[in-house]
Amino acid sequence: MSDINRNFVAGEWASGAQEIENRNPSDTTDLIGLFAQADLDQLDATLDQACKAQAEWSAYGMERKQAVLMNIGNELMQRAEDLGRLLSREEGKPLAEGRGEVFRAGQFFTYYAAECLRQLGENADSVRDGVEIDVRREPVGVVAVVSPWNFPTATASWKIAPALCYGNAVVWKPANITPASAVALTEIIARQDIPKGLFSLVMGAGSTIGQRLVEHPSVDAISFTGSVPVGKGIATAAIQNLTKVQMEMGSKNALAVMDDGDLDLAVSVALGGAFGGTGQKCTASSRLVVHAAVHDAFVEKLVAGAQAMKVGHALHDGTQIGPVVSAQQFKENLDYVALGQSEGAELACGGARLDMPHDGFYMSPGIFLNTTNDMRINREEMFAPLAAVIKVDSYDQALATVNDTNFGLTSGIVTRDLARATHFRRNARTGVVTVNLPTAGTDYHVPFGGRGDSSYGPREQGKSAAEFYTTVKTAYISAGVPA
Ligand code: NAP
Ligand code: MG
């Protein structure tokens, strides 16, 4: 692929003044392509066109909208193999995960295709005689979608699908490190029966094109997934225009392993939660809070399990953990390994650069032992194949430790005790809680989001998405007959 991959602005594919290289983190000699960087004039032009297109789109019949979303979803699911391969090639997750992500992205579109037909309102009698009330949802307008690299197709899809479903226009600024997946999804959307300019792709740096997008007065709502500092900056920009904003950010998720659980299950849940996606998931189990009674037995199996995991090229058979996404991320990960050790944690395994036949960012999965919850490695999101074990003496201490964080996206418990499972489910201060399952891995038809620094604004996914992508209108209707 040596042609320049273009942006999709005001309904046309357009080059920019500059382009960037996209390279494979499994093998940096593999150039995936060159990607145009949208300029600020193109952004202005596409936002103008988006406003016009949105009015047209919201007037489309519901079945016509439904067909558009269904086509996009079906094509993603049918092409999960080749698009998953492209995703894994640029992001570094093993092929099975890349394929699974694209398929899931398709499911977001087919789910919201169905929601196009299910846009029910409410009605009520007024407190005034002879007056009826009709409450309906209307589109917000033009939605800016700003998405991260770690789920380049799924995260964008769980925003774009509901935005379109509820009658909005979309301007998408994907992460610049995974532009190929963005172009691939845009090619599918661009081929549909939609008004010119309803959907735009503006690739470029967050600090330039992203910043201008979130500051733009033509944007009615911003849906962002990414880091806390960038999220705070976006909220600050949004408030200047009183733009609606929804943000999903980092986390520091904990898995509590109780003394009454199945130990092998606990180990597989912990390994999957900690190292799936190379640990680069906002839902990763980076704190493993383990009851003292099973601590030693759990740790022995956990370390053996981590050491047995196969790190390798994302596209090769048998790879369980791919490379980390970039040189910068790799450096930050190694810094955290050094930090943990300087804080007094014991590195039981991994956390090191691996030599491979390919020039990529390969890191062995690392486990810290003898850690306390106040260490920085247990407070800050590392976004790395690193997990820390925290030993506790009781269930109560486990719950308190799980909740002792500024974040609050997911948490989990491994236990056979129904009373504990129930108590945990009710008292964990996170937006998602799991019982005998990894903290990562969620469905598409139910709400997703967190508390504390992890989220801001209405929940995403499922029916909850309507809260953000629509605005409610309350109509009072009288028959017009004088009383
Ligand atoms: P990031 O650095 O915050 O970037 C996220 C997106 O924001 C990218 O598209 C980025 O563009 C853009 N951006 C950066 N600066 C901007 C600005 N000033 N104005 C507007 N947009 C701007 O996060 P990341 O490194 O891509 O992703 C990792 C983070 O995402 C982690 O913290 C992780 O926890 C979080 N995450 C959260 C969830 C969730 O649902 N809670 C899910 C997945 C990931 P460029 O990078 O192209 O410059
Ligand atoms: Mg970043």
Image (cartoon, grey):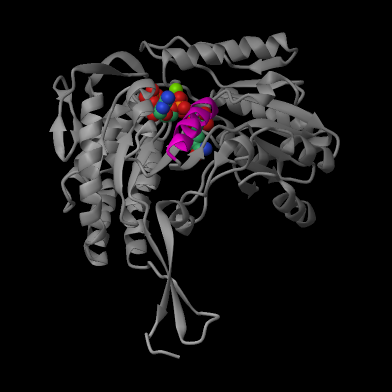
Q: Is residue 229 left or right of residue 142?
A: right
Q: Position of residue 244 (x, y in %)?
A: 45, 44
Q: Where on the image, by quarter, is ligand 2?
A: top left
Q: Is residue 236 magenta?
A: yes
In which quarter of the view is residue 2 placed?
A: top left
Q: Position of residue 408 (x, y in %)?
A: 64, 39
Q: Is residue 187 magenta?
A: no
Q: Is residue 205 left or right of residue 43?
A: right
Q: Nearer the viewer, residue 153 or 459?
A: 459
Seen in the picture, residue 396 relative to 195 is either above or below; the reply is above
Q: Position of residue 479 (x, y in %)?
A: 38, 86
Q: Residue furthest right?
A: 393
Q: Does residue 483 show up?
A: yes
Magenta span of residues: 227-241
Q: Report the number of discs.
A: 0
Seen in the picture, residue 333 relative to 120 is either above or below; the reply is above
Q: Nearer the viewer, residue 26 or 153?
A: 153
Q: Is residue 244 left or right of residue 11?
A: right
In which quarter of the view is residue 15 placed?
A: top left
Q: Residue at x 45, y 9 (%)?
A: 355
- The overriding secondary structure of the stretch rendered in magenta is helix
Q: Nearer the viewer, residue 119 or 222?
A: 222
Q: Nearer the viewer, residue 332 or 145?
A: 145
On-image quarter of the C terminus: bottom left
